[in-house]
Image (cartoon, rainbow, N blue to C red):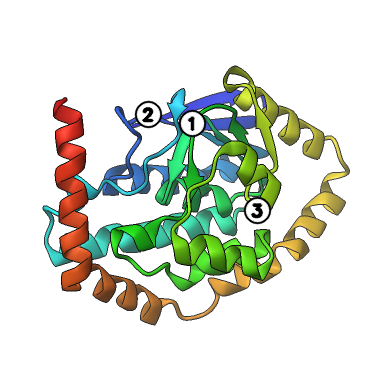
Amino acid sequence: MLLAIDHGPIRELRLNRPPANALSGELISQLRQSVEAAPGNETRALILSGMPRRFSAGLDVPLLVGQDRAQVRTVWRELYGLIQALACSPIPIAVAITGHAPAGGTVLAIFCDWRVMAEGDFKIGLNEVAVGIPLPGVILAALRRLLPAHQAERLSVGGVLLSPQKALKVGLIDEVAAIDQVVARALAWCEALLALPVTAMTATRRAARADLTAYFNQNLEAEIEQVLADWWTPEAQRTLHALAEKLGKRKEA
C-alpha cells in the first residue's frame, strides 16, 4: 500500500493502493507511522507521491459505508493523527500530486509544505460538501492559510474541483509540471531547501508554520465528535451510499 523510496537524505512515500489510492484505515495508519518515523531514520525531507494519473481519490467511501460506528470512528481518528503528523513534522514535506486528488487527496496536500501537480485533465479540491459532509474545522483552517478568505469560502462551500492551472492561479498548489517530472520537481524543491543553513531554515520553518501546528495543540475531541455526528446524519448517509454505489458500478465497468 505504501512504497518507501530513498533519494539520499530525502525519502519518497508513494501511495500504492490501486486502482485509485483511496484512503483506507490501513493505508492512513501506514502513512502516519512512516511520516512520524522518518526523522528518526536520518531522513531530512519527505516527498508524498502517488501513482501516475491518480494521486489519491480520498477516503475509501465504498469500504467505509460498510463499516460500523466504531470502525468509522477509528478511521477518522487515524486521519486526524495523519494530518497532525504532516502539519507538525520537524522536517519539510513536499507533495508530488501525480494526478487526480479530490477530497482526502487535497487534504493530504494542504498540510504539507509545498505542492507540485501534474499537468493534464486532473482535478483537485475539497468537495466534501458534495458528498454530504461539512468541511471539518482543522481542514478549513489549513485551506485559509493558502488562499484569501473569500477564495477559501468559495471553494469549500461550493465543493469546487479545479484543474491544475486553476489551482495554481488561486494558490492551492505551488507549481505545475509534466506528469513524468512531478516527483523530480518535488525532489529539487527539497534539495534546495536542504542546501540552506539547517538551523536557520528549520527555525524559520517552525515559526512560519506555528499557526497551523497550534491548531493541534487545542482540544480536537469536540471537532472529531462533530465530524462523526455529521457522518451519520441521514443526508450524509444517503449521499455516501449513493456515491459508493456509483463507484462500485464504475469499477465493474
Q: Residue 90 carries which label?
A: 3
Q: How far apart are marks 2 and 3 (CA)?
A: 25 Å
Q: Position of residue 128 (x, y in %)?
A: 38, 59
Q: Which mark is residue 16?
A: 2
Foreground tag (3 vs 1): 1
Q: Tell me the crowding category of disc 3: few under 14, some 14 to 19, or many 20 or more residues within 10 angstroms, Cα based.
A: some
**Drawn side of residue 12 relative to residue 77, left or right:** right
* Residue 190 seen in the current view: yes
Q: In this view, does 44 lie above or below 71?
A: above
Q: Provide the secondary structure element on which disc 3 rests.
A: loop
Q: In this view, does 158 lie above or below 15?
A: below
Please report contact status of discs 2 and 1: CB closer than 8 Å, yes or no: no
- Counting residues from the start of the chain, the first of labels 3 and 1 encountered is 3
- Counting residues from the start of the chain, the first of labels 2 and 3 encountered is 2
Q: In this view, does 126 lie above or below 93?
A: below
Q: How far apart are marks 3 and 1 (CA)?
A: 27 Å
